[in-house]
Image (cartoon, grey):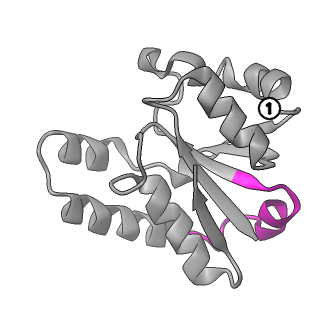
Amino acid sequence: MKIYTIGFTQKSAEQFFERLRQNGVRRVVDIRLRPSGQLAGFARKEDLPYFLRSLADNCEYLHLAELAPTKEILDGYRSGGAWADYEQQFQALMDERGIPEALDRESFERLPSCLLCSEATPEQCHRRLVAERLQAHWPGVEIIHL
């Protein structure tokens, strides 16, 4: 099973939707804490389902808040916290939330899914941490960062 990840910043709408379409993504799983923020542009929660249907071959949209960091964890990192601390706190949060056991693996197998966040690259983004956690617990997962 392939699990894709993508960030919307530093991408045009054309680049974003073409990457999804060209890779056969059938569902975008939004794992942002604030998917309706005014800085989200074309990736606002209210607009994204329409764009995915229209521009990405009828791709589905799903917001999974349980895969987002808490406001406290995010604010701590954004105010100058170390990435290692953020990663440790986020992993502990995933443990508390029972991830990935709380997720429906069959739906990820049935619909090629892409984890969405805002960061341009996955290196210091929680979407990479979520994808790696799924890979560690679900045999046969291949991660592809778009």
Left-right relation of 134 to 126: right
| Membership of 92 in magenta stretch | no
Residue pictured at 65% horizontal, 72% vertical: 142
State the image quarter where residue 74 is shown.
top left
Residue pictured at 88% horizontal, 32% vertical: 58
| Magenta stretch bounds | 98-113
- Inspect the image, locate mark 1, and give the three-letter code of the amino acid beneath it: Ala
SS for callout 1? loop
| Residue extending farthest bottom | 139
- Is the residue 51 above or below the residue 58 in the image? above
Percent x, y of residue 99: 57, 69
Mark 1 sits on what residue?
56
| Count of marks overlaid on the render | 1
Percent x, y of residue 88: 28, 69
Residue pictured at 66% horizontal, 50% vertical: 114
- Is the residue 18 above or below the residue 26 in the image? above
Left-right relation of 93 to 13: left
Percent x, y of residue 41: 52, 16
- Is the residue 29 above or below the residue 59 in the image? below
Of 31 and 8, the residue lying toward us: 8
Do we see residue 44 in this rendering? no
Left-right relation of 74 to 27: left
Percent x, y of residue 78: 21, 40
| Membership of 112 in magenta stretch | yes
Residue pictured at 60% horizontal, 61% vertical: 144
Do we see residue 102 in this rendering? yes
